Amino acid sequence: MANDKDLFDDSTMTFGEHLEVLRFHLIRALMGLTLCVIVTLIYGEELVRLIRYPVDQALQRANKNELIKIEENIKGVSFWESWKQQILPPDTTVATERIKTDSMTTTERRNIEIQLSAHELADQLHQASPERYPAAADDLKDKTLKLQATSDAFLQFRVGIEKIERPVTFNVQEAFMTYMKISFVAGLILSSPWVFYQLWLFVAAGLYPHERKYIHMYLPMSIVLFLGGIFFCFCAVLPTVLDFLLGYNGRMGLTAQIRISEWINFAIMLPLMFGISFQLPLIMLFLAKINLFTAHQYLQQWRIAVLAIAVISMVLTPTPDPATMLLMMGPLLALYGLGVALCYWTRTREKVEIAT
């Protein structure tokens, strides 16, 4: 016999009234999203520069390392030498030189400084006109002359070099579409607290008081872990990944031209994976709440957990080098310990509440 009981028989609101409340909160969420997207569209160019910053810096470091190889006549760098360079503190001279170059005026960019040997210059003058110029003295061998030359060709040369250190576009609309995409994603992130709040107002009416308590307690923690994973990936992981990949281009004699649309997709997806993976403590706590695992079992199976985290880090990171893998594996191991601590803490707290 079919069950004629409606889902909303025990509710004080009808199905139509629930839909009306949902429509009300969705409209308010969309209004907040639209407002935030308008704001991010205004500052879209600054956001594009922010997303471009890691790849711009990586291209500058790669070009600087290529010049060093040419000056020192280095044929290539071994894998372990490359890995050692990744874990060392980054060279700040690249950023300093870029700041100096960006702050130069057009007139200054047309100038170039030429260094000449005083002895060779005097010797050439003597050979050209021995009657007018005497032979070069030996004490001039250690002296260097600095001359300033000005030409529009130097300006064009500087601009051409700077273009090599920038991402590229392959069609005319790509820059505009990148601008729109970044603005929309940034607007969605900016409006996410308001959107989640509106959805929470709709869902909270159907939850029990103890269920609302868990949401109030763990939702802020989830947001902090998610944003922490994104920030860690953007500041620590992306520069290491880029240095590793661009280093292989240099060693193989290739010139890297990074397409801005492909970089934007990469720069969005990798931090997103880090943000999701940083939810590990809350996932462990959820599994403990539904009695699939206990804190004691988490501690007993720590070897299997380390292996699983290593495999996950290997799969989620886009490069096979150990440095990038460790950058994800290290935080996840620390978060695994945090998850065990949360399981013990909530279990002890529940026992105290039951006893009282």
Image: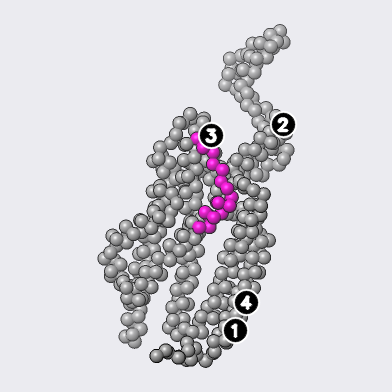
Q: Earlier in the sequence, mark 1 or mark 3?
A: 1
Q: Which of marks 2 and 3 is nearer the N terminus?
A: 3
Label 2 to label 4: alpha-carbon separation:
61 Å
The residue wearing badge 1 is 20
Q: Name the residue: 50% across, 43% down.
A: 246
* Dot 1 and dot 2 residues touching (CB under 8 Å): no
Label 4 to label 3: alpha-carbon separation:
56 Å
Q: Which amino acid does label 2 sit on?
A: Thr
Q: Is mark 3 on a helix, strand or loop?
A: helix
* Dot 4 and dot 3 residues touching (CB under 8 Å): no
Q: Say the numbered circle drawn on residue 150.
A: 2
- Horizontal and vertical percent position of residue 327: 42, 53
Q: Name the residue: 67% across, 49% down.
A: 172
Q: What residue type is labelled 1?
A: Glu
Q: How crowded is mark 2: few (under 14 residues within 10 Å), some or many (20 or more)?
A: some
81 within the magenta span: no
Q: Residue furthest front?
A: 1
User: Height in image: 193 above or below 178?
Assistant: below
Label 1 to label 2: alpha-carbon separation:
72 Å
Label 2 to label 3: alpha-carbon separation:
24 Å
Q: What residue type is labelled 3?
A: Leu
Magenta segment:
253-269
Q: Earlier in the sequence, mark 2 or mark 4?
A: 4
Q: Say the numbered circle drawn on residue 27.
A: 4
The residue wearing badge 3 is 67
Label 1 to label 3: alpha-carbon separation:
66 Å
User: Height in image: 253 above or below 261?
Assistant: above
Q: Nearer the viewer, mark 2 or mark 3?
A: 3
Q: Which of marks 2 and 4 is in front?
A: 4
Q: Residue furthest left?
A: 300
